[in-house]
Image: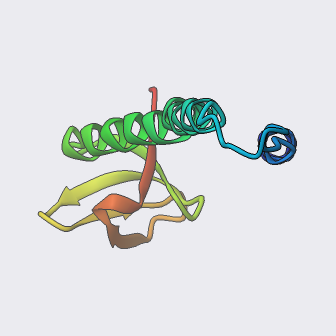
Amino acid sequence: MKKMMGLMVASLALLSGCTVPEGGEESGTGLIPMLVFLVVIFAFFYFVMVRPQRKRIKEHEKLVQELKKGDQVVTAGGIYGTIESLSEESIVIKVESGGSIRVARNSVALRQER
């Protein structure tokens, strides 16, 4: 992430060094490269940040919808357990000590393979 920000700052510094031609008239050629640069930056951010995040969100929603009784799961808080029951908004997880914990359905981070 720091490398990307450094690259952006360096690119903006190069663009800010553009000057007006000596004739005193602006030819308008400085605007087109700047617009192209901005489009490239937005495309870069979309493909590097937005698109992968949307993919992760869709995968997590699919995981949460496919949960069923008996699945071994790990919550976002790091709790390992087996699903005892499910409701629309929460699940009850049986942990190793024999106790049960009710957690939000969306807090399940991953499902373990048996």
User: 108 or 2: which is nearer to us?
Assistant: 2
Q: Is residue 99 above or below residue 38?
A: below
Residue 57 falls in image quadrant:
top left
Residue drawn at (33%, 60%) of the image:
106
Tell me the colour scheme of the image.
rainbow
Residue 72 falls in image quadrant:
top left
User: 21 or 4: which is nearer to us?
Assistant: 21
As drawn, is 101 to the left or to the right of 105?
right
As drawn, is 112 to the left or to the right of 24?
left
Outermost left residue: 88
Instruction: Give the position of the C terminus as an image quadrant.
Output: top left
Residue drawn at (62%, 30%) of the image:
29
As drawn, is 44 to the left or to the right of 110?
right
Q: Position of residue 19 (x, y in %)?
A: 82, 43
Residue 35 falls in image quadrant:
top right
Residue drawn at (66%, 42%) of the image:
26
Instruction: Give the position of the N terminus as an image quadrant.
Output: top right
User: 45 or 21: which is nearer to us?
Assistant: 21
Q: Is residue 104 above or below residue 7?
A: below
